[in-house]
Amino acid sequence: MTGLFKTRLQRHLREMAKYLRLVFNDFFVFALLFFLGGLGWGYSNVLKTLKSGLWWAPLVAMLVLVIVAQIGRFATLIEDADRVFLLPRERAMHAYLVAARRYSQFLAQCTQLIALFILAPFLSVALGWTLPQVLVLAVAQVVLKDSLLRLDLASVYQVTGQRRMNQWEFKWLLAIIVVASGVWLSPYVALILALVADGAVTVWERQHWQRQQIRWREQIKIEDNRMLGIYRFFNMFTEVPMVSGTIKRRRYLDWLFKGIKLNHSQTYLYLFSRGMVRGTDFSGLVVRLTVIGMLLLYFVRGEWLPVILAALFIYLIGFQLLPFFQQYDDVVFTHVYPVLPELRLKSFVKLVTLILSTTALLMWVVVVIANPQLMTAGITLVVEAIEVWYLARIYTPHRLARADKK
Amino acid sequence: MALEVSHVVGGYSQIPVLKDISFDVKDGELVGLIGLNGAGKSTTINHVIGLLTPHKGKISINGITIDQDSQAYKQQIAYIPETPVLYQELTLREHLEMTMMAYDLDQKAAWEKAHKLLKTFRLANKLDWFPANFSKGMKQKVMIVCAFLTNAKLFIIDEPFLGLDPLAVNDLLNLIEQRKKTGASILMSTHVLDTAQRYCDRFVLLHDGQVKTEGTLSELQAALPEAGESLNDIYLSMTKVDRA
């Protein structure tokens, strides 16, 4: 069974490596270095202004550590088919799960140590701690994380009353108690409490797992959610096939569709508009980019900078909308309906025009509010209008017609 | 002649699944497409609805091929897939409206028809639900309602009897009967042979990508006299050829 975990882990790591290569491209690494450098510089500046004995300093330390303690989840790599194929080997699954916990330790504990490393200067400046104290707290934090992961492992099994133990409230409460005692009383107290908790969880889990069944459905769901979170993150940088958004009814937005007449030529506008509004994938993208763009434009001053920024954001949104055209290609009726492909393309162009015009208008309003010069507002409007027209009416149909032929 | 498939060679890749098949469906006729798993039933259907292009041969509906006029060709078809396929973001009402728009139907007349169909299949109170969350049988009923909304001349129904409750099966057979009377044709693939035997006018027996035999039940019985009386017996004797 540990062999099975090893095989799965190798496959998992290969997959992660593939995506990480795509995420950490040169451009992103460069941006990240700048970002981290800026943060570090800001942090050191803040530290210089701090004095010992601030009332809120322990509170901040506690919050950071309690949140960090929740980072690093129990990666079981369990798959949906397991509840059929591994069911007969349920007892043997324990070895698999222990291997999974050991693997999960690695990343989780690295995170804890890095967090404490970053927090150490703050602890020494604001709380006046010495190095041994910080080190003891670090050990306490690691033991605390260990007990949380053991708790995750224990809750794989169905134990009476254990449903409560697995809930996030319990995990947060335990972390708060341990960390608070460490920050306000002494790191040694935290260490003792963490050791007691860790020991208790270990003993408890050893006692009951052999007599309990695995909660397959819950575990599969938890693991699916964990993977989905990871894929979502990667999806911000690259196309991830495993991520499919959810559908929300959004009845309060139904008025948006009123303008679409129920006639043959609008068939796909009818579908595309609803798909866009109710699916979370593309609508989320458009909303996120529009909001970020508007915020940036509000804080940016200058004659040309707002124009360039507005144009950039419209381009980004327009470009990212293109794959939505293929959204329904795997629904057989898209090909069976007696609707000419040209009509489908026309509907899509209309949708893109509508979305981009709305975004452009919103950004233009922000530019007008933020910049007193009429010149900038005027130029922005003209540039936006030309860009929307070109992107929606010329570029989009051209690109999609070419993609369709392939 | 509603549907005419002549000498079609085709499949998903360069390797042909269908090896020169020919058959037809006449006006007002229900033809059963019978064959084992992997015999080529779904491939045949995918060729007829235009998802696949034949390597060789010709498929025409009332004399029109898809190359001549894809719009007119598709306008004549209503398709009910084996596994229900739905637009995740559309409610049941919107699925119906979308069908009406796609087939360019008169909204008022179509809704009258729709309400009757919804009542028959006990979906009338679920108009504002997402059918994507329905059970398989209910999803299939949505497919049936959408298909029978249209004025198609050729209905293509892929394995309709699995997943439907007995009442719905009966209602579907009644619908088919009604449409046949107005001159529409139906091509239906199925494994439920005793139902097929009772309702189909003719049968096309596919085996290994070829049309093994075709004809009415009495024609099949005459062609394979030692096989037995029922469609089931004929079907089994036909498949035995390979297993021996």
Image (cartoon, rainbow, N blue to C red):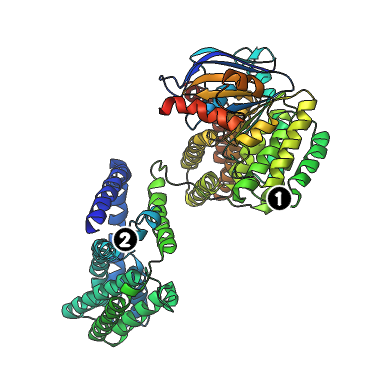
Question: Horizontally, is B167 left or right of A100 in the view?
Answer: right
Under mark 2, the amino acid is Arg
**Dot 2, how many residues are within 10 Å of its Cα: few (below 14), some (14-19), or many (20+)?**
few
Q: Nearer the viewer, mark 2 or mark 1?
A: 2
Dividing the picture into quarters, in which one does residue B62 lie? top right
Under mark 1, the amino acid is Asp
Dividing the picture into quarters, in which one does residue A229 lie? bottom left
Question: Horizontally, is B120 left or right of A378 in the view?
Answer: right
B131 shown above or below A334: below
Report the chain holding disc 2: A
Residue that label 2 marks: A89
Residue that label 1 marks: B128
Question: Horizontally, is B182 left or right of A44 in the view?
Answer: right
Q: Quadrant of the N terminus of chain A?
A: bottom left
> Do circles 2 and 1 both sit on a common chain?
no
A119 shown above or below A193: above
- Who's the residue at 48% across and 47% down the image? A301
Q: Is residue A261 visible?
A: no
